[in-house]
Image: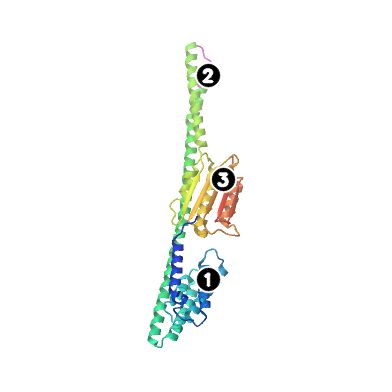
Amino acid sequence: MRRVGTDEWSGLAMLVVAVAVAAPGLFGAVETTIPHGWWIALFVGFLAALLAAVGTRVSGRLRYGAFAATVVAAWVLVLSASSLGLLPVLLVLTAAVSVYVVPLRVGLIVVGLNTVVIILGTGSAASDPVEVTVLGGFYLLIQLASLLSSVTLLREQRMRRELAEAHVDLQAASVLLSESARTAERLRISRELHDLIGHQLTVLTLELETARHLDGDAARTHTERANRVARDLLGDVRATVGQLRAETPDIAQALRGVARDLPGLDVTIDVSPGVHVDEEGNAAFVRATQEIVTNTIRHSDARELRILVTADDHGTVLDARDDGRGARNVVLGNGLRGLSERFHTLGGDLAVDGGDGFRVTARVPAR
């Protein structure tokens, strides 16, 4: 179940404020120029359109239409009330959420039109030009402050998202670089052991094999014993070299290194016991985790991401699922398309599903 975050709480507070300022009109304390039932229905439509305009699951055109309906409904609600009271706050709400839907210049136009509506509404209820000017200027400043605050908040959110994406890329590069360095060091040590000690022991074995055929029982006994020791040492060296070459990467540590310390996203990584992959498979899963986490931060609007890695007789499977908004028609971008090609090269496959959150399943065959 998705946790309630600051966005949901701010949306709830916005609804409470809207209902509070419209309460006099809703309960008949303020007369309206249109039938009271229609005024209530218009207010309900205003709330529905406002929620649709800021909803993340609504397509672009529908959001634009919903925002336009929100603005027009707010104008009618204000102009149809005999006494404004705090109703202009509804116009402030439309100005505050405008930058989430339309460009800033359009939001500024909405602020200007809202101010004209407030002046018209105030002028119909009051005859003092000073009062009309002061009230219009006051709400103009409040709208501008709300609009610019929303712009600042969006800019901060975008910067945090870009910082998180850069952090993921840096962590993935660090993990792969560390693994590459360890692999290179293992190969260097194994080559030196084989070329230096292994070569010397091989020469020693040949020399002792020759000495074994010389005369003298005592010499033969000692040379045979030395021969056995030399062969045992040679076997130990080769076994050590084989272990260094066959050492497998720690996939759990690698994946957790990629998704560590991400602001705003709780990533859980579970790796089943007995999961072992080679260096190519480890690199593929690290790149998959990097792409999945980056896409979740950039597109999914999710707060939780769980990555599960399991293995069976057929291969190793990485299954990642978030609690975001998903996608009805999934279109693979360059990142996911590149991942799919990488896993196909290894003999595996990659599948995506946006029906419930967003899910990515990647598999490499057993080797």
Name the residue beneath numbered marker 1. Answer: 49
Q: Tag 1: residue type?
A: Ala
Residue identified by numbered label 3: 317
Q: How many marks?
A: 3
> Circle 2 sits in a helix, a strand or a loop, which is it?
helix
Residue under numbered circle 2: 210
Badge 2 amino acid: Thr
Does residue 189 appear left or right of residue 311 in this picture?
Answer: left
Q: Give the crowd class for mark 2: few <14, some 14-19, many >=20 residues within 10 Å.
A: few
In the visual, does 205 lie left or right of 138? right
Q: Say which quadrant the C terminus sits in.
A: top right
Q: Answer with mark 2 or mark 1, whichever residue precedes in sequence.
A: 1
Spatial separation of the CA atoms under disc 3 and disc 1? 43 Å
- Taking the view exactly as shown, the residue that stands out farthest to the front is 28
Q: Is 107 inside the magenta-drawn segment?
A: no
Closer to the chain start, of discs 3 and 1, is: 1
Does the segment drawn in magenta span residue 210?
Answer: yes
Badge 1, how many Cα within 10 Å: few under 14, some, many 20+? many
Q: Is residue 292 above or below residue 24?
A: above
Is 15 above or below relative to 33? above
Residues at marks 2 and 1 touching, judged by CB atoms closer than 8 Å = no
Query: Could you say whether the residue bearing mark 1 is in a helix, strand or loop?
Result: helix
Q: Residue at x 56, y 72 (%)?
A: 65
Looking at the rendered structure, the kind of residue marked 3 is Val
Front-most of 154 and 90?
90
